[in-house]
Amino acid sequence: MSERRAIGLGLSAVLLWSTVATAFKLTLAEFTPIQMLTAASIVSTIALTLICAWQGKLSSISTTFCANPFYYVLLGVINPLSYYLILFKAYDLLPASQAQAINYSWAITLTLMAAVFLNQKIRKQDWIACVLSYFGVIVIATKGDIVSMDFDSPLGVSLALLSTLLWAGYWILNTKNKADPVVGILLGFLVATPCTLVLSWLEDSHWSQISYQGWIAATYVGLFEMGITFVLWLSALKMTQNTARISNLIFASPFISLMLLATIIEEQIHPTTLVGLVLIVAGLAIQQIKFRKKALCQSSL
């Protein structure tokens, strides 16, 4: 019963994450990236606070932060503040199909950064995965014209790649975090949200011109990209007896996302975007398959 519930939670998270690229584009039609981050961060902070209250964890928020304040300030500056601001700007400059596909290579970036900062060994299959995935990124960014290396938006591609560095760095820092994961995520938003308000004020943002549809879109992003969905995913991983089976569900997300982009906002999906995404996912799959085979061999000894 718990395994079935874990799969249900995992699928729910994957389906919700599949919608966010579409939600990003709909929101950015009315919000600047800073406005979008501000509105979504406020929604996420409220949602995560309510979840912590429901789980009886409110009392641990202040004690967790005071135990290592610099650490949680650093986490909050990286994610959500810097990561999402850069990611939203990338989505503002690129077609959503390109931005989300490039951002999906963050797991490969994590492998390389773990080797540098955590002294983890890079296996042969990891190098193959890196080559496949970053070749996929080049195919997407150049629309298949890899000889001329001509990018529609060099800044957009650079920001999308930078977002993978920030996201991977955030999870590397989290390897040392022994606190409750939901409390940790909430602390990041409690640090970042005041900063987003200051940035919005410095930008001299005009909020009165935003329609109610725009506010609904921003609320959706705050709930289902930056807030509740992480809780669903963490709960699924905690509940399952087969982490690999839950983790592999995420491979469906970018392809569902492309279908939604083509259907809902009628974005034209360049054929090379699909080719590049397949290369990226193939690289990630190679890492997963090899790891599982190794684990099976060890368990049989």
Image (cartoon, helix red, strand yellow):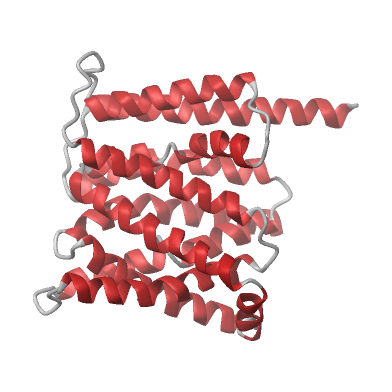
Outermost residue, top direction?
A: 147
Who is closer to the viewer here, 135 or 252? 135
Outermost residue, front direction?
A: 70
Q: Quadrant of residue 25?
A: bottom left
| x and y, in percent, of residue 59 in the image | 64, 86
Residue shown at the point (27%, 37%) measured from the top left: 157
Q: Is residue 39 visible?
A: no
Vertical side of 250 occupied by 57: above or below? below
Image quarter of the C terminus = top right
Residue shown at the point (33%, 24%) measured from the top left: 275
Outermost residue, right direction?
A: 301
Who is closer to the viewer here, 111 or 291? 111
| x and y, in percent, of residue 270 in the image | 21, 29
Vertical side of 297 occupied by 45: above or below? below
Who is closer to the viewer here, 6 or 171? 171
| x and y, in percent, of residue 15 in the image | 43, 52
Who is closer to the viewer here, 185 or 23? 185
Image quarter of the N terminus = bottom right
Residue shown at the point (70%, 59%) measured from the top left: 2
Residue shown at the point (36%, 57%) measured from the top left: 84
The answer to whether residue 139 is left or right of residue 214 is right
Q: Is residue 10 visible?
A: yes
Vertical side of 240 occupied by 195: above or below? below
| x and y, in percent, of residue 92 in the image | 20, 51
